[in-house]
Amino acid sequence: MADLSKITCIEDLRKIAKFKVPKMFYDYADCGSYTESTYQANESDLQKIKFRQKVAVNIENRSTKTTMLGESVSMPVALAPTGIAGMQRADGEILAAKAAEHFGVPFTLSTMSCCSIEDVASHTSRPFWFQLYMMKDRDFMADLIKRAREARCSALMVTLDLQVLGQRHLDIKNGLSTPPKPTLKNLLNLALKPEWCWHMLQTKRRSFGNIVGHVKDADDMKILAMWTAEQFDATLNWNDLAWIKEQWGGKIILKGIMDASDAEMAVKCGADAIVVSNHGGRQLDGAPSTIHALPDIVEAVNRLNSSMEVWMDGGIRGGQDVLRAYALGAKGTLIGRSFLYGLGAYGQEGVYKALDIIQKELDVSMAFCGHTDINNVTKDILFTPKA
């Protein structure tokens, strides 16, 4: 068991993951599209938001516990769906799901995961969420939804902002593939990652677990890219959500909302929650940060007196970021890169450590702002300089 006592922040985990994980997979997780301006803004805009420090307040008996979609959570954080997490560390989705279960937060499995829905279900006891990309092959979609239902997934997260793929320059330059192609460049890089290679040799989950058997040669990234480019449904619109809801019959989360009018449409479509998300800056470069878009969306949903929950992802690298988002109206947050860094660095222990870092920072920062219960936090904790 690794000694993680000196790991104090997500940045520590990022540096270790960069050292341990093959370049093409580290870059896949840690890059944005085009100029990466939106990816960078997600983090930098959060840091610009300052807190009001309050003193001489009784801050005993603090709690970060709350609920997300009626599920009790140890803090308002869930693990976001991330493609090929099993390439950050062998069996990565299973390890992350187990860490999330032990910590008491939700885990979301991506359609494009290395471990299948059934793999994760067989290694966990807490129901997890499943993320769906809408594709033209409706039989495949119906089957995926059925499999998620049979695996006792408690919510279906539909990603709306991937009808076409944003270009991530590093993936093209690195020749991203799963597993890595045995080129001289890749072999030299893998020789420097012995721990990653050792773990990967212990598993058979090296391709796309949810589509094996449906797409021929699903372990070839070029073939998968061609298939997905043909399959992602450019005609996807709000009317299609009725079909998804009929197939699923349970709670629906819509991910990729960045506009107040789209949030209003999500309410009309009967979504149980939305995620204010720009796909981590991996799709539309030049879009605003999620924390910048959040307040208008929260206001639009509140105007409709809707019970739909508004969550946010993008740029969250610590508990203070969770607190900032919560203060601006997000009743939940999702983390992607923050847990992937932990996964790449130390596997299941690393994911748990990432969650622990976030919760402790959330707890302490909440206390300095004079609050003991996350559920009572409002925008009053934020510092607004006089004009």
Image (tube, grey):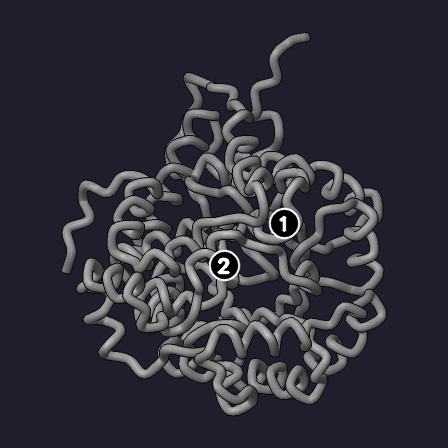
- The residue positioned 85% from the left and 70% from the top of the image is 239
Judged left or right of residue 258, residue 156 is left
Q: Is residue 338 above or below residue 47?
A: below
Relative to the observer, which residue lies in front, 330 or 19? 19
Q: Quadrant of the N terminus?
A: bottom left
User: Looking at the rendered structure, which numbered label has been put on residue 278?
Assistant: 1
- CA distance for labels 1 and 2: 21 Å
Which of the two discs, 1 and 2, labels the residue nearer the N terminus? 2
Answer few, some or many: residues within 10 Å of disc 2's Cα (few below 14, many 20 plus, some between 14 and 19): few
Relative to the observer, which residue lies in front, 376 or 180? 180
Q: Is residue 312 above or below residue 2?
A: above
Name which quarter of the figure residue 247 lies in: bottom right
The three-letter code of the residue at mark 2 reads Ile
Answer few, some or many: residues within 10 Å of disc 1's Cα (few below 14, many 20 plus, some between 14 and 19): many
The three-letter code of the residue at mark 1 reads Asn
Judged left or right of residue 122, residue 277 is right
In this figure, which residue is indicated by the disc labeled 2?
172
As drawn, the residue found furthest toward the top would be 387
Q: Is residue 375 visible?
A: no
